[in-house]
Structure formats: structure tokens, C-alpha cells
Image: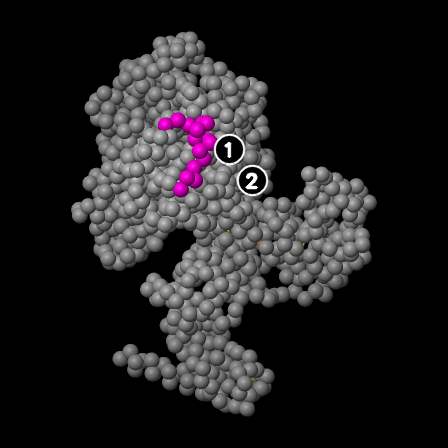
């Protein structure tokens, strides 16, 4: 598109088509006062401060008027001054004017405009000022709303609508009473998700963070929480994090953050942080010096070389640390018994997609989602678990994309959905194959793509015979016409993207679910194209990286198989060792091996299986039986309390390294502050242990050197080097130092040996444990936006605890009525494996017969209930489905109860 | 609440254009618009809850707090004002222990003021549950409160 040339105040200005006069001016460094304009939002023209004169046309609002070729614009004239002076004075009448003590002093747009336009003291004194003050709303723990400061520019409202899609606020009342308000006025009681996006955009001090200090300097790094991997700027002052903001240049989040990423960093400076190594003496964990702890660990590990040893690596540690961990385990301790929490989340994606496409990661980018014409979100509560990625879904819908949401629960994303399918937990294969069947029968598939790029279509097609729609309807509980409608919608709107998360994977047939998704995308030719793809949303911040780095029992870094002798010899040559040839045990198998006495020593880094593992009491028994358990973490977690040695680690804000986000983007993690006390980065600790075990190849002085070694051995990371990761990272595969990275996978060929993707015929298998007379309800698990994983970090952020600090059993109103349960009532939830005590929340978000819990809260350890039945391929436990019953508890809560269930409650009182 | 709302929603299709009639019927049922009901209306019509609130607050006909069993409206029109409305209001506020615009904690009284109610000839006027009480005085205010208090008391016995 040709650029436009116009003249503003006599200056030649060149701007792209579609820009407004205001944008053209600001772009060229010409200031025009403006209050209701924001570059991220559609213009509305309500403040009337941006008045300009266009030759031949007269006065116009610069924020609304499109720039045109040859336009001559004046920003200053008597008439302009008159108009905007009135507009400004009307605002100032109602504005408190206590600038020096105002939180926005120096950064306030109104101040800037007043300074630019100039306000005469005489006139100002004559302006009638309102005496009425309205009470500020301080209900949100992170920010304050003061209606008296508000200039009614509507930026917050439009942000919440256009960008966030939460629609929590609007202009309420009318006339002079008009004000920004949530439903009923209190911010916390509304649909607000506390993202703070409105707060960062408010031009005045009407919306301000409760705690704000101007930082001394800022460091760019990655959010410590979810797999979206938002780039953040951490503001530091006096060695502490005082403010966090999004990076507007980042291709991942464009400056946007969710509540955890923006406000959830207090855990870094929490007094509970581990500050010295601890060693168990006479049953007590006592502080010791690093030397002593490391010596002890090395001496003990030395005795358990081989398959008596196992390690659990961490999706919260960097790539470099995961690489070193698996190197230590394989090259020094001589076993492939290494795994991490990906086993519990996306192992079926890795296994399933590797089989059909050759690569088990998100095929497209986060940004790409906004280009989709149809998004099929199944088994993902995106706004809660991947909030900033969900903004792309909202954006796509605003651009006219269809959104199909399939979820056993009624979730927030439903508000944006074109079509909502509330299927029975665990019936995903039936639903997906049912849709595939409709697409096949109605010939809506992409025959050309299937012929050119796939194999095994006929066998797959034959297997669709096993999914007549009557059966699908009955298995899923979704009306037949909705299945047909979903199938047509998906097939007829290309490019279509599939998003999924743990609702798909955490099943005994998790791998089948993934294969069914793969089939559907292949059938419609939605791979290798922008806006399409299969997009497994990874949970923890660096879970993609931990997998990439080979913290898995069967593969070395870059998914290179341990049972391939050629691969092994490549690594053996560089590492100077002999590698064990057979795959090790998966995380879920390790616990049985511990109970059998086969595994005797465990090195656990940044993991908390006591709360995260299905059938948690089983895991606890196993860990208690170990001869030697080392836990390395930033807090004394429930699991760490069982350890023989606890090693204090640095958090991601306290070290350098890289994280790989869910879209395969390797990004720099940078040290912002010093670790507390004696805490050390995990990479340093691993190197120390390895060296004390007499190993060479662990003398690194900076993670950068570790990355060079990774790049030399890992083809998909071949082009990764720290200087190349500036400023916005690189997406793997990136095989060489001059490769630009790969945003979209499989554009030409699939990563399979013959370059073709595979269809897989499937059968329907019901979940391993379904409700019966004794345990009549189906328990499914989900996540809260305000908490993360087992809560070790988020539960140490006070504001997040205010927003959601307690487990609730969600139950349908009809079930609640039948059992005579009232909202907030205390009950015992019991499964065949254990029980927890919890308050109920009566909500229609659960369908009848289904109840749900999260697993964030140590005092209600949900995973004592869940079933450890495993998917035969991926060995993931079925944490999404188990059978429970509810026993009402009368009277006040009994604090003693949890102690009987598990003794992990001591950190619960916080 | 669930059932009552379902009954109201049963008469509609859940289209966003139906928002105002739905709100009217909900208010008719509950006497005001409870917060939970507004949420349910938002869900039903797929109109964001903040928008529902914006629409509801825009119109004077909707109220957001329950109203007392005795709904007292003191006329503030010119005629009534001149003939002592301020003193009547003052006395009612004193007797009831609530301010204008408030409802007593036991939900017995709501006290509001209105502009001319069109009965200037009878001024000063007070309306109690939509019935005009003519030629009102502060003494009558005290009586009114005492009368309905004993009525309420006898009802509970
Ligand atoms: S914090 Fe986020 S969700 Fe809440 S009102 Fe502001 S923009 Fe909307
Ligand atoms: S709160 Fe801030 S952003 Fe929202 S309308 Fe008021 S001044 Fe504008
Ligand atoms: S979406 Fe994820 S990565 Fe982004 S700010 Fe939130 S928790 Fe952090
Ligand atoms: S910036 Fe143009 S009207 Fe507000
Ligand atoms: S002024 Fe009171 S009725 Fe008219």
C-alpha cells in the first residue's frame, strides 16, 4: 500500500494508509493534545481535545479523521484553542488537582494537556468546583479505582472490551452521575479478571496500582508462570522487584499480561524462601554450609549409580538447567530414569503428535491464532490457564472468526463462543471422531491435502464406521445437531486452528484423544498454514523446554532417542561417557519402582509431586521409603519436608538462562535481583554435585556456555545462541546460526521419515473409573486463574489469595438441591483412594453429575482422590476423571481432619 | 431465586433486545434488581454483565436495593416545599433513623423524595405505598411511623 503525504503545521509527514491525522502527527513527533485516544484501541472521539483544522474542511477531531494524501492540517489556531480550552476546563472543574501528591504525577495525560494548553489562574478560580466526593473502590487487592479522578475517557472500558474481552466495566448511570462501574460497583465482585490492562492505560490517576514505586532500572525477562511465556519488564529498586510491566514489542504478548504475570511476583521476596541448605539430622532438617550439603549429596549419589537412581527435573527451571540435569543423570549416574511434570500434562501430545506429524509441539504461533477463521478450543479453559493467549482467541472472534468451545464445564470462554459443546468428561474421542465422520460423509474434507501429504486415510475412514452419530450422541451427551454443526463450522472455515490442553491429555486414553485431534486437522488440511494448526497449550513456563532438553526417560535433547546407537555415540563422544541404552522409567512409574525398592535415591528439582501426582498418598508412601531424597526448590514444599537434603535454589528472577514457551520460542531469562541468603541457581548446584562425583564437562561459569553445548548436540536448537535471542527469541527448529527460526511447522513436509503425516484409526474407550452406586459423582479437575500449579509461588502472593485463596468443590444446583447442600457448606469428598474436606460452591458451570476441584491448595490435596490409571502409551494418569461421593458435614469445620489424611498441611495456614 | 428467574426467562428467548422487558419483569418479581439476578440476566441474554448494569442504571425505573414494606415518598415540589416539606422530611428522617434514599435495616421503611406528584392543592404531600396523604405535618409523620410499627408488631404476634 502506498504511503500518504500530508502537511501538518507546515511539515511534510509521511504515513501508512489507514492512519488517522492524530496518528500521523504523533508518528512524526508532532504533539496534539489527546485524552481518549489509545494506540491499541479504536478511536471514539469523546474528549474533543484533539481538535485540528483541515484546510478546506474546517475543524475536525484528529483521532477520528483518516489522514489523506495532500491534506493540509493546522494544530494551532485561535478557534482550536477556544474549543479545546472549553473541553479541558470542563474536565478540570471536576478534577481534584492535587498533582504533587497524586500517584500519576509526571505521567498524567491531563497534566500534560493542561500544561500544553495553559490554564489561566483567574479563569480556573472562577470555575465552579463540585464538592461531592465519591468513595473510591479499593476492593481489588492490586489496584484502586477513584471515580473522583476519572475523566470519563472510556479507555478502561474499551480496553476491557476490545482487548481483554472480560467486559467487566462500563459507563453506568447518566448525566452528571455518569461513572465507570462494574456490575454493582465493587470491582472484585464483577467479571473483572484483575489483569490490570485498564490500569496501565488509564491516562490519569483514576485507576492506579495499589503499590507502586518508580523503579531505578528495568530488566527484560520472561514471566515465571505459564507456558505462554509473556515477556516482562521487571522494575527494580533497592534490590527488590517493585513493579512489573509487559513488553509492548514482544511478539508473544504485545505488552499484555494476566494477573499473575503483572501482580504475582511477591513470592520472590517472601520470608519463606529457602536461604541455606538443610540436612536431616535426628529427624530434623537443620541448616548447614553448602560444602557440607554438597559433599553429602555426592557421597550418597555415588552409592546409587545406575537404575537405583532417579531424577525429577523441572518445568520451572531453565533449558540450561534441564539439560545439565539430564546430562548428570545419564552421563554421570548412568541411568535414563529422568522425567518431569510434562508426564502429567502433555506427554500424550509429545507421543501422539510425534507419531502422526513427527513433532509434538504447537504447530503454529500465538499471534497466528488471531488469523484463524475458526478456532476449536477443546479441553482448555484458556482464559484461566493461558490468559494472554486467550486474548488472541478473543481478538480472532472480534475479527469474525467462529469459536467452538468443547468443555465438560461451562467456562468463561463460552461467552465468546459461536457454538458450545458440553460433553461428558472423557468422551473426547467420540466427539472428535463423530465430527470427523460428519466431515467424511458430507465430503467436506480436503482431498487434495490428504492425497498429497498424508497416509493411511482409508484405514482411518473405515474406523469412522465405529462412530455412528447415535452412539456419539449418547457417549458425549451432546445433541446430534450440535455435532453436525460443529463439524461443518470447522470444515467450512479455513484456516481453522485447534487449541487444546489438559482436558484432552489427562486421560487413560490421552494419546488417543491427541490422535483424534490430529486426524481432524489432517482431514481438513489445516496444517502447515497460517491461522491453522494443532496447538497443545503447554502448562508451566518452561515445560516445552524441559521436554526439548531431554528431561524425559526415552529421549536425549532434541527428541533424539536413547535407544538409537548412533545418537548415543554422538553424545558419548562429547560427554566422554558410556550412555545407558534402554529408556528409563516415566515419572508415574518411578513411584511404583520406589515402593518395590528398585529406586533408592531420588534427586528432585523444582517439583512437588506430593500435591501434583495422581493418587498422591501413593506417591507420598513411595517417597518416604527412599534411602536418600534430595529436593532442590525455592520453598520448603510439602515434598521437601520429606527430604534428607534440601538445597535452596534461585528463582527465575535471580538467574540467567532461557525458557521455551508453548509456541517453541526460546527466550532469555535474565537475572533481575540477587537470590536470598545462600540460595544458588540450579545450574550451579547441578555442576557442583557433578564435579564432586568426579565428572568432567560440568565446569560452566555462565549459562551461555551451556547453551553452546546444547546447540552443538541438538539439531532443533542448533542456531540458538544468546546474542541471537535478542530481543524476541527464536522459534525452533532453528538448525543453524543463520537460520531465522520456524514460526509454523510442517509447511512443506512433516517431520516423519517419509515426510507425510499419518491418519490413525481409533476406537472409543471409556475412562478407567466411572461413577457407580457407591461413588455416584464424576470428579474432574481444573485450574484457577489466580493460582498456579501446587500454589508454592502464587499462595505466597497476598493479593492472589484475596482473589481466590480457598478450594471450592463446584457442584451443579440440581445435584446440590438433591443432596441438600448449601453454598459454602463443608463436605467430605471421598474416592476409593482418599478424602478431602472442602466447601461447596453451587454453580451451573458444572453439569449435573459432575463436580470439580483444582489442585492448587495444600490443605485440600485433591490428588489424594484422583486415579493413577495410566495411558498405556504416554503413561499419564487420568487426573481428569474419577468417581467420588460427597458426605455433608454438619457443624463447624474440623481442623484436625487433614492431619489424618496427610501431614502436608503445615504450610497451609498462610 | 433460581426458580423465579427461570420462570421469568421462560417468557423470553434470551435475545439482547429483550434486555429491558426482562429487567422489568425481574424487578416486578423481586421488587428490585438483585445483583445475582443481574448476573443471570447477563448470562441469559449474553449481554456482558457490566452492560446490563449500565442499561439498568441508565433508567430511573430500576432500583438495586430492596425496598421497604412502607415506601414513603416526600414531595419536594415547589408547592410542598413552601408549605413545609423540608420539616416533614426532617421529622421522618428523625423518626425512622434513616436518611433520604435509604431503607431501614429491617426492610420496613424506605424514604425517598420526589418532584411534584401533581397534587399541589393538597400540599404538603407524602405518598405511602402510592397513596397520597394530604396536608401532611411533622406530627402526622410521627403518627405514621408509630401506627405502622404497631401494625407490624401485631402482625408478628
Ligand atoms: S483489570 Fe482487566 S478485567 Fe478488570 S476491569 Fe481492568 S481490563 Fe477489565
Ligand atoms: S478510569 Fe481512567 S481510563 Fe477509565 S474512563 Fe476514567 S480516566 Fe478513563
Ligand atoms: S499468561 Fe502466563 S506467561 Fe503471560 S503473564 Fe499470565 S501467567 Fe505469565
Ligand atoms: S483524542 Fe480525539 S476526541 Fe479524545
Ligand atoms: S409540589 Fe407537592 S404535589 Fe405538587
Left of A365 or right of it: where is A613? left
**Residue position for label 1:** A529
In the rendered structure, does residue A449 fall within the stretch colored magenta?
yes
Q: Where, by quadrant of the figure, is residue A515 drawn?
A: top left
How would you rate the neighbour count of disc 1 (Cα within 10 Å): few for under 14, some for 14-19, many for 20 or more? many
Labelled disc at residue A255:
2
x and y percentages locating residue A882 in the rendered image: 25, 41
Label 1: which secondary element: loop
Left of A418 or right of it: where is A724? right
Label 2: which secondary element: loop
**What subunit carries mark 1?**
A
Which residue is at 53% across, 20% downward? A719
Magenta residues, start to end? A442-456
Mark sitting earlier along the chain (2/1): 2
x and y percentages locating residue A300 in the rendered image: 30, 17
Q: How is the image coloured?
A: one colour
Q: A325 or A499, which lies in front?
A: A499
Q: Where, by quadrant of the figure, is residue A11 drawn?
A: top right
Q: Quadrant of the C terminus of chain A?
A: top left
How would you rate the neighbour count of disc 2 (Cα within 10 Å): few for under 14, some for 14-19, many for 20 or more? some
Which residue is at 75% across, 53% downward? A52
x and y percentages locating residue A320 in the rendered image: 45, 22
Amino acid at each position: 500500500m502506498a504511503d500518504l503525504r500530508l502537511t501538518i503545521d507546515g511539515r511534510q509527514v509521511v504515513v501508512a494508509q489507514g492512519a488517522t491525522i492524530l496518528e500521523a502527527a504523533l508518528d512524526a513527533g508532532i504533539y496534539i493534545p489527546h485524552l481518549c485516544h489509545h494506540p491499541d484501541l479504536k478511536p471514539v472521539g469523546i474528549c474533543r481535545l484533539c481538535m485540528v483544522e483541515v484546510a478546506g474542511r474546517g475543524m475536525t477531531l484528529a483521532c477520528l479523521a483518516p489522514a489523506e494524501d495532500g491534506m493540509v492540517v493546522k494544530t494551532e489556531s485561535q478557534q482550536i484553542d477556544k474549543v479545546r480550552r472549553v473541553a479541558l476546563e470542563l474536565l478540570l472543574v471536576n478534577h481534584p488537582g492535587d498533582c504533587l501528591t497524586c500517584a500519576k504525577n509526571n505521567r498524567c495525560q491531563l497534566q500534560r494537556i493542561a500544561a500544553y494548553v495553559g490554564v489561566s489562574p483567574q479563569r480556573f478560580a472562577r470555575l465552579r468546583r463540585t464538592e461531592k466526593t465519591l468513595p473510591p473502590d479499593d476492593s481489588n487487592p492490586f489496584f484502586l479505582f477513584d471515580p473522583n479522578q476519572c475523566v470519563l475517557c472510556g479507555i478502561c472500558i474499551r480496553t476491557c472490551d476490545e482487548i481483554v474481552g472480560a467486559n467487566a466495566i462500563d459507563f453506568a448511570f447518566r448525566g452528571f452521575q455518569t461513572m465507570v462501574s462494574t456490575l454493582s460497583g465493587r470491582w472484585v465482585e464483577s467479571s473483572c479478571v484483575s489483569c490490570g490492562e485498564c490500569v496501565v492505560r488509564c491516562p490519569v490517576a483514576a485507576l492506579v496500582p495499589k503499590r507502586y514505586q518508580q523503579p531505578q532500572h528495568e530488566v527484560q525477562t520472561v514471566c515465571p508462570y505459564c507456558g505462554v511465556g509473556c515477556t516482562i519488564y521487571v522494575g527494580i529498586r533497592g534490590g527488590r522487584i517493585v513493579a512489573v510491566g509487559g513488553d509492548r514489542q514482544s511478539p508473544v504478548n504485545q505488552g499484555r499480561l494476566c494477573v499473575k504475570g503483572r501482580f504475582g511476583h511477591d513470592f520472590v521476596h517472601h520470608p519463606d524462601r529457602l536461604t541455606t541448605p538443610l540436612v536431616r539430622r535426628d529427624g530434623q532438617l537443620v541448616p548447614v554450609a553448602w560444602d557440607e550439603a554438597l559433599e553429602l549429596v555426592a557421597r550418597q549419589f555415588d552409592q546409587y549409580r545406575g537404575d537405583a537412581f532417579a531424577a525429577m527435573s523441572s518445568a520451572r527451571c531453565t533449558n540450561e538447567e534441564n539439560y545439565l540435569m539430564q546430562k548428570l543423570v545419564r552421563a554421570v549416574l548412568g541411568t535414563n530414569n529422568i522425567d518431569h511434570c510434562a508426564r502429567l500434562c502433555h506427554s500424550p501430545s509429545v507421543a501422539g503428535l510425534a507419531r502422526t506429524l513427527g513433532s509434538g509441539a504447537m504447530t503454529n504461533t500465538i499471534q497466528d491464532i488471531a488469523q484463524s477463521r475458526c478456532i476449536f478450543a477443546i479441553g482448555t479453559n484458556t482464559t484461566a490457564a493461558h490468559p494472554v493467549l486467550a486474548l488472541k482467541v478473543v481478538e480472532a472472534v472480534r475479527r469474525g472468526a467462529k469459536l467452538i468451545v468443547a468443555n465438560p464445564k461451562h467456562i468463561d470462554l463460552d461467552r465468546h463462543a459461536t457454538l458450545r459443546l458440553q460433553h461428558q468428561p472423557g468422551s473426547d474421542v467420540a466427539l472428535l471422531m463423530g465430527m470427523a465422520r460428519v466431515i467424511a460423509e458430507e465430503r467436506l474434507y480436503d482431498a487434495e491435502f490428504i492425497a498429497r501429504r498424508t497416509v493411511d486415510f482409508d484405514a482411518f475412514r473405515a474406523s469412522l464406521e465405529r462412530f455412528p452419530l447415535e452412539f456419539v450422541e449418547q457417549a458425549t451427551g451432546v445433541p446430534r445437531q450440535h455435532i453436525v454443526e460443529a463439524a461443518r463450522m470447522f470444515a467450512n472455515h479455513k484456516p481453522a486452528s485447534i487449541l487444546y490442553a489438559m482436558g484432552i491429555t489427562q486421560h487413560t486414553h490421552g494419546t488417543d484423544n491427541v490422535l483424534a485431534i490430529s486426524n481432524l486437522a489432517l482431514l481438513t488440511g489445516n496444517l502447515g498454514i497460517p491461522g491453522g494448526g494443532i496447538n497443545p497449550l503447554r502448562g508451566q513456563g518452561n515445560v516445552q523446554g524441559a521436554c526439548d532438553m531431554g528431561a524425559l526417560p526415552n529421549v536425549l535433547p532434541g527428541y533424539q532417542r536413547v535407544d538409537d546407537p548412533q545418537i548415543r555415540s554422538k553424545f558419548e563422544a562429547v560427554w566422554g561417557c558410556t550412555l545407558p541404552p534402554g529408556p528409563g522409567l516415566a515419572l508415574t512409574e518411578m513411584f511404583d519402582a520406589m515402593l518395590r525398592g528398585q529406586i533408592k535415591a531420588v534427586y528432585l528439582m523444582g517439583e512437588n509431586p506430593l500435591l501434583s501426582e495422581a493418587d498422591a498418598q501413593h506417591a507420598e508412601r513411595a517417597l518416604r521409603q527412599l534411602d536418600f531424597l534430595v529436593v532442590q526448590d525455592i520453598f520448603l514444599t510439602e515434598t521437601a519436608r520429606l527430604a534428607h537434603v534440601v538445597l535452596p535454589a534461585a528463582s527465575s528472577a535471580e538467574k540467567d538462562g532461557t525458557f521455551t514457551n508453548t509456541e517453541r520460542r526460546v527466550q532469555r531469562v535474565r537475572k533481575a535481583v540477587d537470590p536470598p541468603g545462600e540460595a544458588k541457581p540450579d545450574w550451579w548446584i547441578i555442576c557442583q554435585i557433578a564435579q564432586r562425583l568426579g565428572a568432567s564437562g560440568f565446569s560452566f561459569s555462565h549459562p551461555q556456555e551451556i547453551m553452546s553445548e546444547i546447540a552443538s548436540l541438538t539439531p532443533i536448537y542448533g542456531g540458538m545462541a544468546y546474542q541471537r535471542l535478542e530481543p524476541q527469541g527464536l522459534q525452533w527448529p532453528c538448525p543453524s546460526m543463520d537460520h531465522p527460526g520456524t514460526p509454523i511447522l510442517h509447511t512443506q513436509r512433516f517431520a516423519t521419515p517419509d515426510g507425510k503425516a499419518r491418519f490413525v484409526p481409533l476406537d472409543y474407550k471409556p475412562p478407567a473409573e466411572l461413577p457407580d452406586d457407591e461413588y455416584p459423582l464424576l470428579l474432574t479437575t481444573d485450574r484457577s486463574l489466580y493460582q498456579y500449579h501446587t500454589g508454592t509461588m502464587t499462595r505466597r502472593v497476598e493479593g492472589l489469595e484475596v482473589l481466590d485463596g480457598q478450594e471450592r468443590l463446584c457442584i451443579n444446583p440440581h445435584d446440590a438441591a438433591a443432596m441438600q447442600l448449601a453454598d459454602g457448606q463443608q463436605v467430605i469428598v471421598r474416592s476409593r483412594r482418599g478424602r478431602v474436606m472442602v466447601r461447596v460452591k453451587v454453580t451451573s458451570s458444572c453439569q449435573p453429575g459432575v463436580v470439580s476441584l483444582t489442585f492448587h491448595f495444600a490443605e485440600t490435596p485433591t490428588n489424594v482422590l484422583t486415579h493413577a490409571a495410566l495411558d498405556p502409551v504416554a503413561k499419564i494418569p487420568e487426573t481428569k476423571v474419577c468417581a467420588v461421593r460427597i458426605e455433608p458435614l454438619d457443624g463447624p469445620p474440623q481442623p484436625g481432619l487433614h492431619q489424618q489424611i496427610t501431614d502436608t498441611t503445615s504450610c497451609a495456614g498462610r | 431465586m433460581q426458580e423465579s428467574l427461570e420462570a421469568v426467562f421462560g417468557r423470553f428467548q434470551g435475545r439482547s433486545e429483550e434486555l429491558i422487558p426482562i429487567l422489568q419483569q425481574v424487578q416486578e418479581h423481586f421488587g428490585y434488581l438483585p445483583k445475582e439476578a443481574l448476573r443471570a440476566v447477563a448470562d441469559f441474554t449474553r449481554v456482558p454483565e457490566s452492560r446490563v448494569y449500565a442499561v439498568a442504571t441508565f433508567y430511573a425505573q430500576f432500583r438495586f436495593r430492596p425496598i421497604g414494606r412502607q415506601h414513603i415518598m416526600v414531595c419536594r415540589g415547589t408547592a410542598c416545599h413552601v408549605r413545609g416539606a423540608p420539616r416533614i422530611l426532617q421529622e421522618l428522617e428523625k423518626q425512622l433513623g434513616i436518611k433520604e434514599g435509604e431503607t431501614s435495616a429491617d426492610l420496613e421503611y424506605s424514604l425517598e423524595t420526589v418532584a411534584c406528584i401533581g397534587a399541589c392543592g393538597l400540599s404538603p404531600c407524602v405518598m405511602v405505598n402510592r397513596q397520597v396523604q394530604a396536608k401532611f405535618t411533622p406530627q402526622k409523620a410521627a403518627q405514621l411511623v408509630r401506627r405502622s410499627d404497631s401494625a407490624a408488631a401485631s402482625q408478628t404476634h
